[in-house]
């Protein structure tokens, strides 16, 4: 660059032949330039032949550049002529003196002439360019429509050959994802239907020599005389796609994404009224799929997820342990809530959960009569204030099919939830290793669980796609020989190939952190029905199995220093480690998290808190039970704040009525529960009866 500049400097003024000029500036520049040369040349007695030489060089220079940028011959001629005319005038003016009327007048005329010629050549150039662009577009369009015409002709021919139906193609559209195209066609008169083509999907795919995993599927068109045929040409199921990292809020009402179709579009599960059944043999990617489902529920603002996993909790634990262990913190440094609302890993806990679900459903039916009447519906309006409970039961189909008597009791409860709770916002997602025959013979499941997934992962044994997706033909297990891939059908989207996103453990942790503040709380009416069984779901003895089953934790003894991969109790001080059992510590920590969100006082049950609290914040730890309903939490705080004097149901209800709308009857229910479980003590009888928190009760 600098060397070019230096070279230019040494060789005098630079002539930029490519410099742009419009018709006016070009003409002005030419005439003023010519006049200046003529005036200077005359004054300095320059030989007039020089002007001609400069003009010839100018004409040559512009012609070369013009050729290089592919100007039209007409433009080249105009420019060269301008230079030559200008040079001729300069030579004449230098010989006769530039300052005469004749020379000046002729110069002005030449200027106007050059301007007009330049304008006309510019217009010509523009028109030429436009014409070239249009021709190019015409060619692209012609090629495209030739391609479309070729596709149309090929498929008309194919469908005639395979299905004996003579279609008239109305349009062919290539997908933006580049993974295939859709054909919109008219069925011939005489009663041909789209199903006939749909039924021949496999034969059509084979005839078209589509790659594995690609299909030609027919679906209804805009009316019954039309058909849409979607043809995938690129196998997106073959690649591994991780769960999209946008963990933004979702709603059950607008659908939860469970994976993607062969055209790379997401597929949504609508579960307000439907239950779901997911079948996948070992190694097909079923656990991964359950995590994808739990991720969607965690992101939803109107869902509380209850998980039953009697298989060592592998489906639920990754959603609980990182939060319980304090391994992850929210952005503001606060502890996070687990990604699921309740996890049952033992038979007893599962039974407790199912019984609670039945109670909640029944209570909702009674307690929300006014809400239903006001909304003029028999479907409970689900939202953040009344969340839907999604009961995810890993290998639930095996529970349903079990001959074991005690397991049958669980099965009966599952079926009861499925049967009674649709309107009241409790739905189930059952997974199955393969016992679909016996499960699908159950009328209740057939009727209520219409969101269905069959993960094949290349497994052909025991896969009865016909039973899973009745009425859908042309699905073959070998079309999806990849882990995490299979078929999914919902009432809104007919059964077709799909793949679940791969979700990695660090994504699960990120989702727990990102959604911690988003989870709803169980509404008061449901929380009341759920009672202590729900409120104490994270109690030590009830969560002990999580520690026992923690992967890699082969020594289930207390491990206070947090060594190894078991529950990490690293937050324990040395002193506490010596005195507190790991179970109590886990409970203490979890309560501390709740306290961190709602109060400030230490847990009186931990050794460090034997001295009375010095601060007067909410102390939910003191209540030995996580109370999820905010109204209930406030009621407990009022009880605690009432000290030795105690308080009564009316006083608590009065305090809560405005902000929470809590009735006296509800408070009476809570007080009874607290007396029963030892949280509160009832003192006095009749009108003098009052309730005192056990910390302030006379005997303590
Ligand atoms: N959607 C997916 N995309 C890509 N790979 C997947 C997907 N799902 C699962 N895999 C792969 O398959 C392996 C097995 O998945 P997963 O553990 O979910 O299967 P599973 O059916 O639950 O098997 P098991 O019953 O043995 O636990 C995973 O480790 C992963 O490598």
Image (cartoon, rainbow, N blue to C red):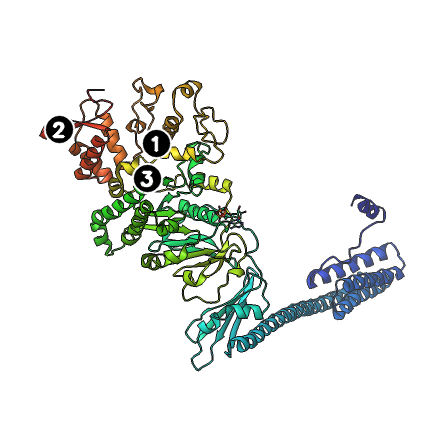
Q: Is residue 263 above or below residue 567?
A: below
| Whether residue 459 can be seen here | yes
Of the two numbered discs 1 and 3 on the same chain, state the one appearing first in sequence: 3
487 or 254: nearer the viewer: 487
The residue carrying mark 1 is 541
Place of residue 604 in the rendered image (x, y in percent of width and height, measured from the top left): 31, 22
Residue beneath disc 2: 689
The residue nearer to you, when weighing 313 against 655, is: 313
Check the image and report above or below for 587 versus 10. above
Real-space Cα separation, disc 1 to disc 2, in angstroms = 33 Å
The residue indicated by pointer 3 is 348
Q: Earlier in the sequence, mark 2 or mark 3?
A: 3
- From the Cβ of disc 2, is ligand 1 less than 8 Å away? no
Residue closest to the eye, 635 or 66: 635
Residue 382 visible? no
Residue 346 at what x, y percent from top left? Answer: 36, 39
Question: Mark 1 packing: few (<14 Cα in 10 Å), some, or many (20+)?
Answer: few
Q: Report x, y in % for residue 8.
A: 82, 48
Q: Nearer the viewer, mark 2 or mark 3?
A: 3
Q: Are marks 2 and 3 in contact (CB under 8 Å)?
A: no
- Image quadrant holding the C terminus, namely top left
- Are discs 1 and 2 less than 8 Å apart at CB? no
Badge 3 marks a residue whose secondary structure is helix
Residue 334's place in the image compared with 249, above or below, is above
Q: Is residue 669 left or right of residue 313?
A: left
Residue 698 is situated, as x and y percent measured from the top left of the image, at: 19, 20
Q: Residue at x 41, y 44 (%)?
A: 298
| Marked residue nearer the N-terminal end (1 or 2) | 1
Name which residue lies at 24% across and 26% down: 640
Q: Is mark 3 within 8 Å of ligand 1?
A: no
| Residue at screen point 45% across, 39% down | 318
| Neighbourhood count class around disc 3 (C-alpha, 10 Å): few under 14, some 14–19, many 20 upward | few
């Amino acid at each position: 660059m600098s060397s070019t500049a230096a070279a230019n400097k040494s060789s005098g003024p630079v002539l930029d032949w490519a410099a742009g000029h419009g018709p006016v500036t070009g003409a002005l520049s030419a005439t003023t330039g010519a006049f200046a040369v003529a005036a200077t040349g005359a004054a300095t007695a320059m030989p007039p032949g020089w002007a001609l030489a400069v003009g010839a060089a100018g004409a040559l220079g512009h012609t070369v550049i013009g050729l290089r940028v592919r100007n039209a011959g007409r433009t080249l001629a105009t420019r060269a002529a301008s230079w030559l005319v200008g040079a001729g005038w300069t030579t004449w003016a230098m010989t006769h003196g530039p300052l005469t009327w004749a020379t000046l007048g002729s110069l002005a005329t030449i200027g106007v002439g050059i301007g007009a010629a330049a304008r006309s050549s510019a217009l010509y150039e523009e028109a030429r360019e436009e014409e070239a662009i249009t021709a190019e577009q015409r060619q692209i369009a012609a090629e495209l429509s030739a391609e479309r015409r070729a596709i149309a002709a090929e498929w008309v021919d194919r469908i005639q050959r395979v299905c004996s139906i003579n279609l008239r193609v109305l349009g062919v559209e290539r997908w933006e994802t580049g993974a295939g195209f859709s054909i919109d066609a008219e069925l011939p008169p005489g009663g041909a239907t789209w199903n006939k083509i749909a039924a021949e999907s496999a034969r059509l795919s084979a005839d078209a020599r589509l790659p594995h995993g690609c299909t030609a599927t027919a679906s209804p068109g805009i009316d019954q005389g039309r058909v849409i045929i979607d043809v995938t040409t690129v196998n997106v199921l073959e690649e591994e796609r991780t769960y999209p990292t946008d963990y933004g809020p979702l709603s059950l009402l607008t659908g939860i994404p469970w994976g993607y179709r062969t055209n790379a579009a997401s597929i949504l599960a609508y579960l307000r009224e439907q239950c779901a059944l997911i079948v996948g043999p070992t190694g097909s990617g079923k656990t991964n799929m359950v995590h994808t489902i739990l991720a969607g529920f965690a992101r939803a603002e109107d869902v509380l997820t209850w998980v039953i996993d009697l298989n060592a909790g592998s489906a639920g634990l990754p959603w609980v342990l990182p939060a319980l262990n304090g391994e992850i913190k929210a952005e503001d440094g606060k502890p996070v809530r687990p990604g699921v609302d309740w996890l049952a890993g033992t038979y007893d806990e599962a039974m407790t959960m199912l019984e609670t679900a039945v109670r909640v459903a029944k209570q909702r039916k009674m307690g929300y009569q006014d809400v239903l009447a006001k909304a003029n519906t028999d479907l409970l309006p689900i939202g953040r204030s009344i969340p839907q409970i999604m009961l995810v039961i890993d290998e639930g189909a095996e529970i349903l099919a079990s001959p074991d008597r005690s397991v049958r009791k669980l099965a009966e409860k599952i079926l009861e939830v499925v049967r009674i709770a649709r309107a009241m916002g409790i739905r189930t997602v059952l997974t199955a290793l393969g016992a679909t025959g016996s499960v699908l013979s159950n009328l209740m499941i057939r009727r209520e669980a219409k969101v269905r997934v069959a993960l094949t992962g290349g497994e052909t044994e025991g896969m009865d796609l016909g039973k899973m997706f009745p009425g859908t033909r042309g699905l073959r297990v070998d079309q999806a020989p990849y882990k995490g891939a299979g078929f999914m059908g919902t009432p809104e989207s007919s059964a077709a190939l799909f793949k679940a996103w791969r979700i990695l453990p660090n994504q699960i942790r990120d989702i727990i952190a990102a959604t911690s503040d988003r989870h709803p709380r169980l509404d008061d009416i449901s929380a009341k029905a759920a009672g202590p069984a729900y409120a104490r779901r994270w109690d030590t003895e009830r969560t002990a199995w999580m520690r026992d089953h923690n992967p890699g934790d082969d020594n289930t003894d207390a491990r206070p220093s947090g060594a190894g991969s078991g529950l990490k109790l690293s937050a324990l001080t040395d002193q506490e480690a010596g005195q507190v059992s790991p179970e109590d510590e886990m409970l203490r920590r979890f309560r501390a998290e709740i306290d961190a969100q709602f109060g400030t006082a230490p847990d009186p049950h931990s050794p460090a808190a034997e001295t009375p609290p010095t601060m007067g914040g909410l102390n939910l730890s003191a209540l030995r039970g996580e109370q999820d309903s905010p109204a209930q939490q406030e009621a407990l705080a009022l009880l605690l704040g009432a000290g030795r004097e105690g308080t009564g149901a009316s006083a608590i209800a009065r305090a809560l009525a405005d902000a929470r709308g809590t009735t006296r009857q509800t408070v009476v229910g809570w007080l009874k529960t607290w007396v029963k479980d030892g949280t509160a003590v009832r003192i006095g009888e009749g009108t003098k009866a009052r309730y005192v928190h056990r910390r302030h009760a006379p005997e303590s």
